[in-house]
Image: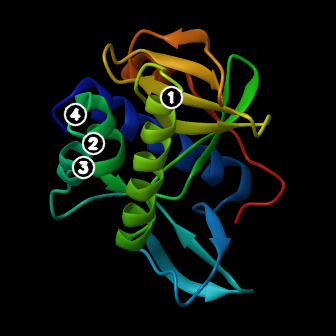
Amino acid sequence: MNTDTQQQLFALYQRHRQLWQSTEQTLPTQFFDPEWSSPCQVGNVEDDKITWQAVPREQKANLNNIEQALEVTLHPSIEDLFCSAYSDHISCEFEGHPVELIQVWNDQDFNLLQENMIAHFMMQKRLKKPASMFIATCSDEMQVISILNETGQVQLETLGKKQEAVLAESLAEFLEKLTPVLTEQQD
């Protein structure tokens, strides 16, 4: 972990794991799907659930194919977020608002994420909006949290509209402000 973003990401994973262990006396759990396995999975399946924890990627991943397809250089924090580890999405609060940090569960998930990122970028280009990449979902399904590609700022974005608010000057700052929460249905 060399960058501030990676350090804050792994600190968030640790806070999330500690929350689960202190409140549920277990690692995080999710419903088990034998066709959707992950390097994150730990232990055996019990009651159709499996425990998991975020793990660093053993082989370096990158987003070069997105950069080539879109003819753009992505902000380095985007690659730090999506190419450093395998993890399930992390339910959090940001300044009292529920958000879910998007993460990569396995290589198939990584490929799907890249396809969605390209589609998002193309939509923004068509709408003549500044390039950004989504990193988290909000309780309002028309809003996402994204990274402005040019500056690395984290923003609240309403799909199809202009930027609403800058939430943090960097992804590292945003990750540091996230508070993991348990949700009623962890899957």
Q: CA distance from mark 3 to mark 1?
A: 20 Å
* Amino acid, disc 4: Val
Q: Residue pushed farthest right? A: 184
Which label was assigned to residue 72? 4
For the residue pair 108 and 40, the one nearer the viewer reads as 108
**Spot occupied by residue 109 in the image (x, y as percentages of width and height):** 44, 66
For the residue pair 152 and 4, the one nearer the viewer reads as 152
Q: Label 1 belongs to which residue?
A: 146
Q: Residues within 10 Å of mark 1 (few under 14, many from 20)?
A: many
**Spot occupied by residue 20 in the image (x, y as percentages of width and height):** 64, 52
For the residue pair 86 and 44, the one nearer the viewer reads as 86
Q: Quadrant of residue 140?
A: top right
Please name the residue shown 72% across and 57% down the image: 24
Q: Are the two marked residues, 4 and 1, in contact with CB atoms closer than 8 angstroms? A: no
Q: Earlier in the sequence, mark 3 or mark 1?
A: 3
Q: CA distance from mark 4 to mark 2?
A: 5 Å
Q: Are the two marked residues, 4 and 2, in contact with CB atoms closer than 8 angstroms? A: yes
* Amino acid, disc 2: Leu
Q: Label 2 belongs to which residue?
A: 70
9 over 25 or under it: above or below: above
Q: Quadrant of residue 155?
A: top right
21 over 36 or under it: above or below: above
* Amino acid, disc 1: Ser
